[in-house]
Image: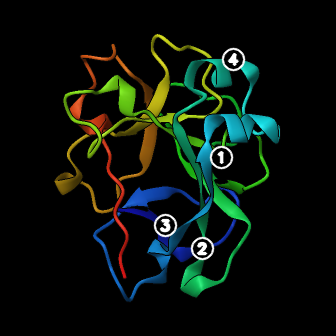
Amino acid sequence: METVYGGTAEVGTPAVLAPPSTTNPAGDIIVRVAGSVTSFYEVGMVSAAVNAQYGPLDAVQLEYAPNGVRTGLCSGLPGTPYQNAGLTLQPCDTPGSTVFILDTTDSPSTGPLYFPIIMGNTTDFEHPFAMTLVGNPAHKKVPQIKIQRLPGNPDHVRRNQLWSANVLN
C-alpha cells in the first residue's frame, strides 16, 4: 500500500510501497477529497481538457494523516508529469498534480477491482501518465511509486499499472 517514506511529513518526501500495517502511521493516507473529475474541474483542480476526457470518472486526493492528524500534504508531483517521475508529498492545494483519476474505463478486463490511476495533470490522453510500480518490489526495500505513460489503452495496461482500493480498519 502507499506509504510515506520514513513517516516524514515534509514536501518532497517520497511515496513508497510498503506492506499494510495497523501500527505504522507512515501508511496513514486518507482520502482528502473524492468526487467526479468534473467536481475537481469546477474548483480549478484539473484542466478543461482533463475534464473533457475523464469528467464522469471518480477522482481523489490522498492526504498524509499520521495517527489521524491531517498534514495538508498529498501524494503528487511537484510540477508537470514526466516519465519515471516519483510521487512525493506536495501541498494538497496544488492543482492537477495532487489529483488522481480512477480510470476504470482503460482496463475493462480487470475493472472495477483493478484499474490504472491517471495523474490529474496529464495532457496526453492516448498515453496518459499513470501510477506505476517500477521493477520487482521483492528486490527493493521501499520502492518509490513512479508515473509512466500507459503504453496503450484500453487493452494494453501493464500489470504494474493496475491498482485497487483497500481500507484498513
* The C terminus: image quadrant: bottom left
2 and 3 marks in contact (CB < 8 Å):
yes
Residue at 36% across, 56% down: 165
Question: Gap between marks 4 and 3, in whole Å?
Answer: 33 Å
- Residue where numbered disc 3 is placed: 5
Tag 4, which secondary structure? Answer: helix
Question: Gap between marks 4 and 1, in whole Å?
Answer: 17 Å
- Residue where numbered disc 1 is placed: 98
Which of pointers 1 and 3 indicates the residue nearer the eye? 1
Percent x, y of residue 113: 26, 46
Mark 3 surroundings within 10 Å by alpha-carbon count, few (fewer than 14), some (14 through 19), many (20 or more): many
Residue at 61% across, 48% down: 35
98 vs 43, left or right, is: left
42 vs 13, left or right, is: right
Q: Taking 98 as reference, is 74 above or below it? A: below
Q: Taking 103 as reference, is 53 above or below it? A: above
Which quarter of the picture shows residue 21?
bottom left
Q: Give the mark nearest the N terminus, 2 or 4.
A: 2
Q: Give the mark nearest the N terminus, 4 or 3.
A: 3
Q: Which mark is residue 140?
A: none
2 and 4 marks in contact (CB < 8 Å):
no
Q: Coloured how? A: rainbow
Tag 1, which secondary structure? Answer: loop
4 and 1 marks in contact (CB < 8 Å):
no
Q: Is residue 18 visible?
A: yes
Percent x, y of residue 154: 31, 17
Q: Is residue 96 visible?
A: no
Q: Taking 108 as reference, is 34 above or below it? A: below
Q: In the depicted view, which residue is nearer to us: 122 or 144?
A: 122
Question: Gap between marks 1 and 3, in whole Å?
Answer: 17 Å
Q: Amino acid at mark 3?
A: Tyr
